Image: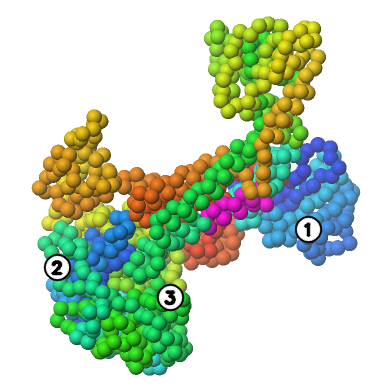
Amino acid sequence: MHSKIYDVIVVGAGHAGCEAALAAAKIGADTLMFMIKLETIGRMSCNPAVGGLAKGHLTREVDALGGAIGQVIDRTGIHFRMLNKSKGPAVWAPRAQADRMKYQLEMRSVVEHQENLEIKEALVEELLVQKGQIKGVKTQYGQTYFGKTVIIAAGTFLNGTIHIGKNKYSAGRAGEFASLKLSDSLKAHGFPLVRFKTGTPARLDSRSLDYVKLEEQKPDEPPPKFSYYTDIEPKNYVSCFLTYTNKRTHKIIADNITKSSLFSGNITGIGARYCPSIEDKIKKFPEKDRHQVFIEPEGLNTFEMYANGLPTSFPPQVQLDMIHSVEGLENAKLMRYGYAIEYDSIPTEYIQYSLETRLIKGLFFAGQINGTSGYEEAAAQGIIAGINAVNYVMKKEPIVMHRDNSYIGVLIDDLVTKGVDEPYRMFTARAEYRLHLRQDNADERLMPLGHDLGLIADERYNKFTEALNIKNREIIKLQKTNAKTDSDKAYKMIDILRRPEIAYDDLTKFGYKIGNDVTDLIKDKISLEVKYEGYIKRQKQEIERFNYLENKSIPADFNYMEFETISYEAREKLTKVKPLSVGQAARIPGVTFADVSALLIKLKTLDAK
Amino acid sequence: MISHNDTIAAVSTPPGIGGISIIRISGSECLQVLQKIFTTSTKPEEMRSHHIYYGKIYDEKALIDEVLVSVFKKPNSFTGEDVLEISCHGGSFVTQRVLQTILKNGARHAVKGEFTKRAFLNGKIDLTEAEAVIDLIQASTKHSLESALFQLEGKLHHAIKLILDEISTIRAEIEMDIDFSDQGLEYKKSEEYVKDLIEIKSKIGKLVNTAQEGMILHDGYRVVIAGPPNAGKSSVFNRIIENERAIVTEIPGTTRDYIEENIALEGYLVKVFDTAGLRERADEIEQFGIEKAYKILKKAHLILWIEDCTVSRETSIPSLKDTKLISVFNKSDLIEKNEIVVGESILVSAKTGNGINRIKQEIIKNIDIQKFDITGGLITNSRQLSAAEKSLKAINQAIETTEVKRGLEFIAFDLHEASEYLEEIIGKISSEDIINSIFDRFCVGK
C-alpha cells in the first residue's frame, strides 16, 4: 500500500502518455507514469517517422504548446522533408524519418529528467473508483497507487491481439505483453469496448536490397524542423527509396488472399480506410496495376529498413514471396514480419472536450483508446489530457481547443462531436480553417497559451516574442518604404512583395535593406501573409461567421428528450453528446438543419423568459 | 411563449365569399377535437390517413354545417403532424362558426405562418419550399402562381443540388490531391480543373440570369408613368388602375410624391407608379418630388412618358439605358383627329378613356418578351439572387486561382465558399436571421 496521493497518474508511456505526464509535471503536478517495460518508453510501434500531411501540423502545434515530440524528432531525425511543396503554403507539411532507437532513448531521457515525474515499470490492471470518482489504480502485483486523476494512454496494448496468417497471440506490440485486465476493469465501470485494427509491414535487411533498381528520395536542405526558438539544429543523414508493386505482386496477393488474417475471418476489428493493408488495396482497387513502396531506414546503427506501403497480415512465406516480386527487393531478407493488431478502444461519446470521461470524474483518456491512430494524434491528446488533469486537480476550468485555433481543436471536436467509426487520422481536409491553421504560424497561434500554462520556458518564449517583434517591425517598414522601380508610379515594398514571382530577398533589387535579424522563418511568414492576404482575410471572416453559432451556448441541463419538436434521432444524439453550443450541435451527424433551427428558436424563447 | 406541439387551427382559404372554405387543424390532438364536434359513421380513432369522411359539425347540440373531413396522419402530412382539413360551405359566417367550435374544443388559433413553420421544423420542406409557400399565398396572379408551384416542386432546389454535386466532386479531387499527395495517385492537372469550373460557372450564371424574370413574376413588372407637369399623368394612372387613386387638379405639379398600385394584366402582376411632373424650374417641395421620380424611374421595367398633345415639348425625355420607354400623348379629346402626327406614340384621352387599352396591350407585349422558362428553376427573390451572385463570384475567384496556380488549398477555399452560398439558397446553412425574416412573412392558415 502506498498512502501517497499523486495529482496525476498516467497509464502508458507512448506518444500520448509521455506528453500527458510531461505536461502535468511541468505545470507542477505530482505525477506518476506507468509503463509495462521501461525500455519501450516513447517507442514507435510502426513507421519510424513523425509528421507528414496534417500530422506535421499537429506536431508543430504540440511543440508550440510546450510538448516534447517536436524537439525529440528534431534531435533524432535522420531525414527531413517538407511535403506538399508543390501546393500552397497552408498545406506544406514537415515530415522526418527518425532513428527509431535514438528517438525512444531521447524521449526516455526527457521524461526521466523531468521534475515532479516519477516513472514506474508495472502493468496497471484495475481502476479504483469510488462514487463515480477516480481514486487510483492497481497493478499486476496487487499494489495500489492513489491519484486525484488518472489518464489512460494504453495505445494498442489494451487487450491487443497480433495476427499473422492463421496465427494469433495476445500482445501489445510484437514481443510485448498486452494489457488484458484493464479492458475488463473499464468495461465493469460501464465503458463499452470497440475493436479496432491496424497493421505494420515487414522490415528488410538493407544489405539485401538492390539499390540500383530503387528510386532515391533525397531529404530537403536545409532540413525543415519542427521546433523553433531552441538551439536544436536537425541534420540529414540518409535518403529514402521508392519502388512499386507490380502485377506479379498482385497475383501472389490475390492467389493467397484467404491466408491473410484479414480475409480468413480471424480479424473482426475495424481498420482505417486511409491506411489499408496491401491485401486490402489489391482487393478494393483491382484496376490499379501498381502501388508505391517506400523503403525507409530505421536508424543509423541498424540495417533494418521499413517497407512503407506494405502492411500485411499474410503468413511469413507469402510475405516473403510478395516482397520478392517487387523490383529491387528480389533478394530481400526479412528481419521482421509484418502483422495486424487488434485492440480495444472506447466510443468517444464517453469523453468531453477536456478529454475527461463522462462516466468517471477525474478519469481521462488519450490516444488510441479514443479511436485515433498515429503518434501525432496521440501526442496532441496527451498534452491536452495532461493539462486538463492538472486543471481538474486545481479546480480550474479545462482548456478547450477550438476548430478555429488548431488542428488539435479539430481533432478533439471531431472525436467528441462526430465520434469515430474507424481509426481516426488527421487530414488537412478536416480543418475548415486550414488557410489559418498553418504550420508556419503554429507558434503564433499556440505559444502564448503554452507559456501561460507554464509549458514554455520564459527563455524560449522571449525568443519567440522577439522574432514576432522583428516581424511586425518589418511589415511596417515594408508598408512605409517606397520601392525603386522604372515605373512612374510609386510602389510600396509591400506591394512589390505581393507579386507572386517576387521572393523576400528580391526586394534588395528594389533598394530594400533587409535587417540582419530577419531570419528565413520571418521572411517566409511575411511573404506568405502578404501574398495571401486576401484569402487570410476571407478565412477570418468565415471564422467570425462560424463563431456566431459557436458562441450560442446551450445550458448544460437542457433536456433534449422533452424537446419534441425535433426528431427522436436528433434528441438521442444531442443527449449523448451534450453539445456546449449550437455550433457544435450542428456538427453532430444525424442532427439536421431543421433540428438546429428548432433548437435556435427554442433557445431564443428560453432567453426571452 | 408559443408551444411547438399543441394543436392549432385556422381558415386556410382566402377570406371572401367562395364556394367552399377549408379549415386546417394540425397537431396531436386533432382527432380528439374532431370526436367532440363531428358525427359520422366512422369513429375518429378508426379514420384512415388520406381518406375523406362525410359528416356533420355540431356545436354542442346545434348543427352548424355539413362538411367533408380529409384526414392526413403524421408524418405524411403538410406539417408532419396529424392534420385535418375540413371543407365547409363557404361564407364567412358558417366558416367562422365551425372554426369557433374547433377552438372551443381544444385547438388554439394558429399564429402567422405557424403551419409552414411546423412543416419546416419537422423537416417536411426546405427553405426554398417554405419561401415558395409564402409566394403561393401571396401570389395573386396566374403567372406568379405557376412559378410558385414550380418552385414548390423544388425545381430551384434541384438545379442547385446538381451544381453542388459538381462542385463537391471537384472539391473531393482536390482534397485527395492535398492529403494523399504522397500516395502516388493520378491527380488532375489545373487546366482540367479550369475546364470543369468554367462549366459550373456557366450553370450558376444561367441561374443568376433567371432572377430578372423570376423577380418580375414574384415582385411584379414595374411600369412608371412620367412626363412634364400637367400632362394628365395622374388621370392616365387612374384610368389604368381603373380607380380614382391619384388626386387630379388643374394645377401643374399636384403630384408631389409617387403613388403605387398593383394591377393584374393577363395574369401578370404589374406595379404601376404615378410620379411627379418633371421640369427644370421647380420650387423646393416640387424638387423633392422630382428627385423621387428619378429614383423610381431608375427601377422601372417600362416607362410611360406622358405629354400633353396640345402643347409643344419643353421637357426633354430622360434617357435611361436598357429601360423601354413608350411615348404617350394625352388629351386627344381636345384636338381634331389626325391633327398631329404621333408616329410610334400612343394617342390617348384620360378623360374619355380612349387609347387606354392600347397602353395596356403595349405593357403586356413588353412583359411577354421575357421567356419565363420556369422549368429549370427560377430565382425569385433578392435573397436568393444575392447568394447566387456571391457563389458566382467565388467560382470566378476559383478559376483565377487555378489559372495563376496559387495552390490547391486556395481553390478548395473558393469552392467551399461557392458551395456555402448555394447551400444558403436551399437553406442548409441558413442563419437564424434568415429563418426569422422568412417566418415573419407567413400569413395565417398555411
**Type of residue at label 2?**
Lys
Q: Pointer 1: residues within 10 angstroms few (<14), some, or many (20+)?
A: many
| Label 2 with label 1: CB-CB less than 8 Å | no
Q: Which residue is mark 3?
A: A288
Indicate whether residue A369 is drawn in magenta: no
Q: Which residue is mark 1?
A: B71
Left or right of B260 on screen, residue A370 = left
Q: CA distance from mark 2 to mark 1?
A: 78 Å
Closer-to-camera residue (A411/B241): B241
Which residue range is magenta in the image?
A: B151-165
User: Which of marks 2 and 3 precedes in the sequence?
Assistant: 2
Q: Which residue is mark 2?
A: A235
Mark 2, chain letter?
A
What is the C-alpha distance between the residues marked 3 and 2? 37 Å
- Residue A148 x %, y %: 29, 71
Q: Residue at x 60, y 37 (%)?
A: B212
